[in-house]
Image (spheres, rainbow, N blue to C red):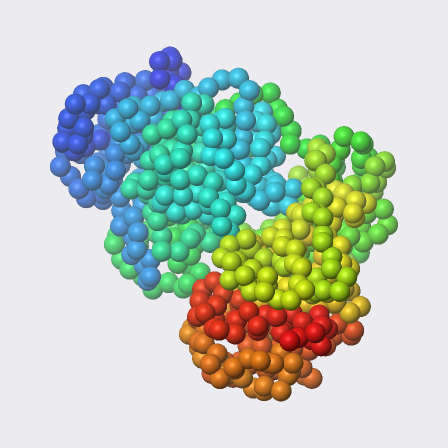
Amino acid sequence: MAILGDILGSAEGQAAPAVDQGSLPTTVVVNEAVLQRVFAKDAAALLAAVERFARDRHGEVVRVGSENSPGVIKGRIAALTLRPERLVLLGAGDSIPAFKVKAQKLEFETDYFYGDLDGDGLAEAAVSRILGSPQAMIGQLGAAPVTGAQHALLLGDEPRLHLEMNRVADVLGELGCSLGVHRWGDPTMLAQADVIVHDLQGDSNHWHGGVNSTIVTAATVPELKRRPVVLAFNCPTGGTGSAIVRAFLEKGSRVYVGSATEPNRSMPALYANELVLYFFNALEARRQASVAELAAAALGQYIRNKDLAALLLRVEKGESPKISDSQQIQLATGLQYQVFGDVTAAFPHAPPRPAFKKSPLTAGAPANLKAGDSLRVKFDIGTGDGVPVLAFTSVWDKEVSPGLEIEIAQNGKMVHKLDWKKHLERSDFIDATTGSFGEGNRFQGRALAPLYRREGANEAVVTVTKTPKPILVQGDSVLQIWPKRKPPRAAPPQTVHRQGINLLLLSRNDSLDPLREALVTVNSLQFDFHSSLGDHLDPFEFPDERGRFVDLARYDVILVDELPRGYKTLPRGFDERIRQYVEHGGGLIMCGGWYAFGGHTGLGGYGGTPIEAILPVQIVSADDAVNEKTAAAPVTMRHPIGAGLDWSHLPSFNGYNKVAARPGVDVLVRTQAGDPLLVVGVHREGRTAAWTAGFGRGWGSEFVKWPYYSRFWGNLIRWVGRKEEKSK
C-alpha cells in the first residue's frame, strides 16, 4: 500500500508549490453530462475551476461520461500513470456514484473504496466529495482560510474530563487556536471559528447539544466567512443529501468530516471516538497534512487494528457476508467516515496557545510498572491556575485488564481508585474518566483524573496496586493545570415551609408539565427544581465553596427523575450526600425511564452506586429498560399510599425498568409479568420508593390521564416524607 504523503495543494489564486516528477497528484473525477444538465448556466465556470485546480496540483481530470458503476470508475482511476494521493469526487451520487454496502443489517453507501487503488482493503488515497451549488463547489476547490488569530470551537463535553476532547484541545492549542467549549448556544458563535469540532449527536438537519437542545439546524447555519474546518466525527448527519452538510458547505466551510450516510442508528461512540484519537495523533505528527489525508490515515489505522481489510474486500465486491454484531458496528463506523469539501484544506496555524500547563509524569519516557510501583509528580497551584488533571495513557496485554487496579493520591490522600475488571472499550465516568481500546493483542488504557485545586505546593502519586503483569505508562502522560474558571453559579435561594413538605425535584427539563401540575395540587408542598447541580469539576476546582451547592438538609423528600445523563449528571460526592441524607431521615423517590435505574443501554447508570444501595430495589442489569406495553395490577391496597385511590383502574404503561425488590420491602404494584412497578421501604431512619414506570413522557402517556394521578403523587410524597398523617 502506498503511504499518504504530505503534499499540500495551493489555495485558489496562489502559486502552487513545486512537485517532484514522481510525486502523486490530486485528481478530480467529474461527470460532465450531469453537470451540464443540472447546472447549465454555471457548468462552464465550474469545469474551468476544476481544470485549474487539477493543473495547479500536477494532477488530472478524469471524465466518466455516462458511466454509473463505481467499480468501473475506480478501475479507470487505478489505471492512471500516476495514481492520485488525493482524489476529489465532484457532485452528489447522481454524478459520481458511491459504493453500496450490504452486510447483515447494514445498508448504506460509501466513498471509501475509491481510495483503495491497489486492492488490499486499505485506502492509500485520501478521498473527498464536493457538494452544493456551483458557487459553493468552486469555493471548495482550493479554498483559502482566513489568516490571523485562530479560534477553535469545541461542541461537546468538558475537555478536562472527556478523553477525546482533551486530546483535541491539546493538539489544537499547539496549532495556535484559542478554545471555546459549549454543549449548546447561539448558532452565530459558529461564524467566529476557524475550527469547529462537534462531538455530540445529530441528524441530517440538526446538530444536537444536550438531551433536549439544538445547537444549529440547516436553516440557521450562519455565514462562515472564516472558512472553517468542520469536524463532526461522531455525528450521523447524513451524506450527499444531508441538509446540514450542504448548509455548512454552502455557507463557507472549506472541509467537513462527518458520516457518509444517515444510518438507522447513531455511530457508536466506542469506535468513533477511537477514530478521533487516531485523527489527532496523525495531526500532531503531520501538522501540514490536509484534513482529508489525516482522515484517511486515521481510518487506515482503525481498519488495521480491527483487522477489517479482508472483510472490506468482500463487501466491495457486493457480497453480503455474515458477520457478528460487533463487526457490523465496526464496519459501519469506519465506512461512514466521510470527507466533504476541499481535499487539500489543512488546519490553520498560528503561534502555539497551549490549553493547559504540563508537568510530565514519566520524564518524557515510557515507564514499566509492576504491582506496588508508583509515579510521582510535584506541581504548584497559583492564584491564576484552575483544576489540575492527571492524564495518562498505559499499554498492557489484554489479559491484564481483569486484575488491574490503580490508585491516585494527592498530598497523601487517595482521590481516585481505577480498575479495568472488564475490557472498557468505551469511556466510563465515575469520578475519573477511563477508556480503553484494543490494538491487536495489546490494550491501551487511558484516564483523566481531576485533582483538588489547592494553592501552593502539591504532589500527585499514581500507584499500580494490582496487576498480574507489568504495564507500560506512555511518555506523553502528564499532569495538566488548566486556567482558572469562573466560580460556579450559586444554587438559587431555597424556599422552605416549616410546617409543609419541602421537595427537591431533580429531572430533565422537558415534558415536565404533568408532574409540575400534580405537585402544585399537593397541600403545603413547596418544590425546587434542578436539571443540573453543577458540573463534575466543581467539587474539585472549588472544594471549599460548599455554600454554592444545594443544601439537602432543607428538604423532606428528593425526587430523582431522569437526569440529562443519568447518574453521570451528579457532581462528585453528591450520591454519597444523598445516601447520608436518607440515612438521617430524608426521603428519596426514583422514577423510571431510559435515564433512570440501569436505564436503556446503561444510560441510567445507578447500578452499584451509593444511591442504588439505599433504594428498595436492586438494579439487576445495566440495560433494564423494557420498552413494551404492560398492564399494571396492585398487590396490596392496605397502605397509606393507596388511600383514596382506585387501583382497579390503573392504566397500562408503555415501558418500565425491570428491577428486583429487596427483602423486607413492600411491593404495592406489579406488571402483568410480575415485575415490581411501585416498591417502598425503609433505609436506616429514612424512607425510599421506586416507581419504575416513570411519571409520564413516553412510558406514562396514559398514566398522566388517570383521574387519581395527582393524588397518587401527593400520597407517595407524603409517605416518603413522613407526612402521611396530614393526608386528607
Please, is residue 80 above or below residue 519 in the view? above
As drawn, which residue projects farthest toward the front? 728
- Residue 619 x/y as whole percent: 61, 72
Q: Nearer the viewer, residue 446 or 656?
A: 656
Please, is residue 533 above or below residue 228 in the view? below
Is residue 232 in view? no
- Residue 223 x/y as whole percent: 40, 26
Residue 499 figure quarter: bottom right
Residue shown at the point (56%, 55%) measured from the top left: 508
| Apparent side of residue 207 relative to residue 688 in the rendered image (left or right) | left
| Apparent side of residue 317 relative to residue 696 in the rendered image (left or right) | left
Is residue 322 in view? yes
Please, is residue 48 above or below residue 387 in the view? above
Residue shown at the point (57%, 72%) measured from the top left: 711
- Residue 266 x/y as whole percent: 42, 53
Residue 653 figure quarter: bottom left
Q: Nearer the viewer, residue 12 or 728?
A: 728
Q: How many marks?
A: 0
- Residue 25 x/y as whole percent: 33, 26
**Split into 4 quadrants, where in the image is the C terminus?**
bottom right
Residue shown at the point (68%, 64%) measured from the top left: 524
Residue shown at the point (13%, 37%) measured from the top left: 66
Residue 558 figure quarter: bottom right
Q: Nearer the viewer, residue 680 or 211?
A: 680
